[in-house]
Image (cartoon, rainbow, N blue to C red):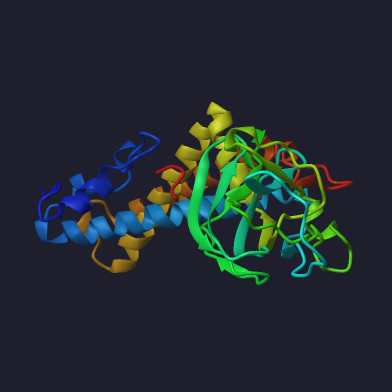
Amino acid sequence: MCILEGLTEEEIAKLRESKSGLYLDDLEGGVNLRAISQIDYCKDFAEKALSARNTALKKIEADVLTSLSNKYKADKKPYIGVVGKTSYTSNLNVSKKYQYLHLKPHSHSDGVLKLNRIRLIASESEQTTFRIIDGNGNEIYSVEVQTQKNTFVTIPAPEGVLPLSENGAVLSYYLVWDRVSAMPKNVKTDCNCGGGTGGYKVYFEAEGGEADSLNNLTEGTDAFTHGLALDVEIRCLPQRLICREYDRENAIAVTMAWATLYKTGEMLIEAVLSSGEVNRYTMMGRDYLWGKRNHFKKEYEMRVEYLGSTIDAGSSDCFICRESRIFMGGIIS
């Protein structure tokens, strides 16, 4: 038996990784490393097993979302546009050190915000620090910026997306820069899309403000960006709903874990059968393996159906119930 012989430390670590606590060995009648009699086939089998697991994770996400779509439909369209027109008429009359734009979601949302481009315009050229601070007071991004008098300068945008909720609570963001003597231009919070602030306003409010301390940032007091202009992409991510429900309800987590395991077992058997080397990987015959594959497939489908009927997509403002219908990293491994 090969067990783990011939595998690298990295490959062994991947095989041992399991956030759910379940492993292929937990599938009765499935194929696993212990069934391999020849060391030469350990590495190839490990690759097949990891590939099956990764595909299963993608498959369950897609299938649960499809199941949910029978009951719910999307309630919000993505918004790709601007927050703050790149135009102004004068300086803002401000007196405090910290100038900011506050982005505050309306309610709990499974939406995310991506900052594609950030620009800043001020009345003087000076060195400043641009920060992003979340509603919990955590500084999540910081970069030094050199402003140019009466000219928009581009600020490097953070990678990734900013979630509009966390642990079931609304999560707002402050985009802050500190001034020395420069005054921000009176850039309005319009989206420049012909509908005022309608484009992004289905997701959040955008209001400007100023403060003497980073510990005293309020919700915003005016309709100006305080010199900022954003190119943004805002959209709902149904995957966040699945992750949230996985964390919220143990029955959903357990069901999802076993569903993923069954799908992994099903796809691994298919990979072994299609290799034409069944006897190299297992002592089981093709007919037996095909029967186990069908059994795992049925167990998986039963759990996906349960998840689709149990996950409460209505708890997210990204979805609404369909009318006249009876009835969307690695999360787990």
Give the residue displayed 46% in from the left and 38% down from the top: 257
**What residue occupies the far front of the structure in this picture?**
181
234, 91: nearer the viewer: 91
Give the residue displayed 88% in from the left and 47% down from the top: 323
- Quadrant assignment for the C terminus: top left
Residue 51 shows up from this direction: yes
237, 128: nearer the viewer: 128
The reply, left or right, for residue 5 in relation to residue 229 is left
Give above or below for 135 relative to 320: above
**What residue occupies the far bottom of the structure in this picture?**
151
Q: Position of residue 248 (x, y in %)?
A: 58, 30
The reply, left or right, for residue 56 in relation to residue 164 is left
Q: Position of residue 267 (x, y in %)?
A: 40, 56
In this rendering, the count of numbered labels is 0
Q: Position of residue 40 (x, y in %)?
A: 11, 61
Residue 269 shows up from this direction: no
**What residue occupies the far top of the structure in this picture?**
250
Give the residue displayed 64% in from the left and 54% down from the top: 113
The reply, left or right, for residue 295 in relation to residue 149 is left
Q: Position of residue 279 (x, y in %)?
A: 20, 59
Residue 168 quadrant = top right
Give the residue displayed 83% in from the left and 68% down from the top: 193
268, 93: nearer the viewer: 93
Residue 214 quadrant = top right
The reply, left or right, for residue 140 in relation to residue 88 is left
